[in-house]
Amino acid sequence: MDFFSRYPVVQLLVLISIMLLEGCATSALKSKDMRTALSQGRPDVALKELEQKGETDDVMVNMNRGIVRRMVGDFQGSNQALELAKRRIDELYATSLTEQAGALMINDESISFEGDRYEQVLVHAYKALNYIALGNIDAARVEVLQSDVKMMEWGEAPEEDPFMRYLAGIIFEALGEKDQAIVAYRKAVGVYRSTKKKHGLAVPRHLQDDFLRILAEENRWSEYKQYKHKFGLSSWQKPETKGMGELIVLLHNGLAPQRNEHSIQTWSNELSLNIKIALPVYALPPESVTQARLSYLGVQKYLETVENVDGLARAALQSDMPVITTRAIARAVLKKKSEKKMEERQGGLAQLAMFIVNRATEIADTRCWNTLPQEIQLARVFLPEGQHTVQLEVLGKNGAVVDMIELNATIKSGSKTILSEHWTAPRTAAKTVAVNTEAETRVKF
C-alpha cells in the first residue's frame, strides 16, 4: 500500500493546495500585463488581454472593458460593458451571507466585486460621456439622473462625487435646462468643499466661472453676489459669448492606483501567538501627475483637475480597512484552529497539508477599477463659430511638451462641443482626432 493510499485526507489536501497555488494569484498580478500595456500607451494590446476572458458578468472585467473600449474609440461597445457592470452591481446590492461566510474561511476575493461607491458613480459618468460621443445627449441625461439616485440611496450622509455633479450641470446646460444646471453646479460647489480633506480638491476655478456666468445669464443676482463673494472674485465679469460656441475638453490623465498585497504579523489574544495576515494597500506616495494645456487661437490655457480618482481610491480603502483587517484576523484564527484540528485527527502530515492550503488561499483583495485615470482634467473655452483645430499639449516635469494631440471641432454659435481624450503615455507620433459631426454635442442653450 503506497503512502497516499494510507493517508487519503493528506492526498486530497495536497491536490487542493496545488490547484490553489496555481489559481490564487492576486487580482493585481493577474492584471499586470494589461496595466503594463496601458502604461505604454497601448490600449489595443490591453483590450486583447481583456477580451480573452470571453463573455462574463464580472463587474471588474466589464468596468475595465468599458474604459479600454472607449480608449480605442468603441463607445457603443464601452457602454455595453458598463451596462453589464451596472446591472450586476444592482443585483449584488445586498451581499449574501453565504459570501460573507466564504470570505471568513477563504479570502475576501470570494465576495463578489461590486466596486467602491465612487467607482459605481463613475460607471454612470463614463456611460454619459460615451453617449455624448455618440451624439445622444438625452441618454447622457438619463445616466445623470440615475447617478443622482445612486448617490442619494447611501443614507443620510450620501457619498456624492463632485465631478459627477459638475458633469450633470454641463449636460443640463447643454440641453437648455438652466434651472437644473444651476442646481447641479450649486451641488458641485458644495461637494467639492465638503470632500476637500478627503481627496484634496478645492472648488475648480472653471466651476466657479461657470456658476457665476449662468447665475448672471438667469438674472439670479442675489445668489450671484453671494457666490461672487464666497469665491473671492470681486472683479469677475461675465465673458462676452455672443456669436460664439463653447468647447469643453476632458483629459482622462494617467492610471488610477493599483491595490497591491502587503503581509503583516499581528498578535492574536485568542491564540496567544503571532499570526500572518494579507491586506490590500496602495503604493505611497501617489505618482506625480502630468500637466496639460490647451492651445488655441494663439492662447494657452491649462487644464484643471476636476476629479482626483487617486484620492478617492485611497480614501475608500482607508475607510474600509478596519473591517478588512478585523475579517483577516478572524480568518487567520479560524485557519490556525483548522490546522490544529487536522493534526489531532489525521496527524502532522495532514496538518502540514492544511497549512499549505490555508497559506495558498490567504491573499489580499486587490481588485479595483484599475483602468480608470489617475485624475480627470478639464478646460472650457468659448470660440467663434466655425472649424477649429486646437492642440492638447501634455507637459513633462520640466514643463516641456512631451506629447501633442490635435483636436478638430466644428463650433456652432450658442452650442457646446464636448470632447474627451485618454492619455497614459506619449504617442509614437502626434495623433489627430478628427471629430465626426455625429459625435459632437451641439445643443442650443
Image (cartoon, rainbow, N blue to C red):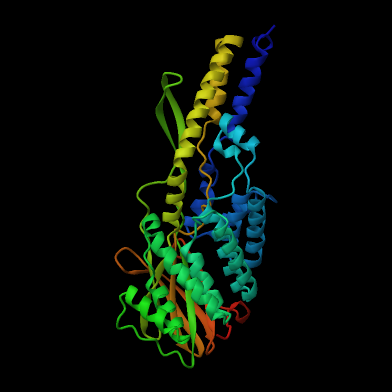
Which residue shows up at 46% across the image and 52% down it?
Answer: 313
Q: Quadrant of residue 415?
A: bottom right
Q: Can residue 209 be seen in this view?
A: yes
Where is the N terminus found, in terms of image quarters?
Answer: top right
Q: Is residue 241 left or right of residue 64?
A: left
Name the foreground residue: 172 vs 8.
Answer: 172
Foreground residue among 305 and 391: 305
Q: How many marks?
A: 0
Residue at the bottom extreme of this rendering: 243
Name the spot of residue 26 as percent of width and height, x first. 53, 39
Q: Which of 202 and 256 is in front in this view?
A: 202
Rendered location of residue 75, percent (x, y) = 62, 67
Q: Nearer the viewer, residue 166 or 5?
A: 166
Is residue 101 shown above or below 254?
A: above
* Whether residue 430 can be seen here: no
Residue 138: x percent and y percent? 64, 75
On the image, the x and y values in percent for residue 193 come to 39, 63
Quadrant where the C terminus is found in the figure: bottom right
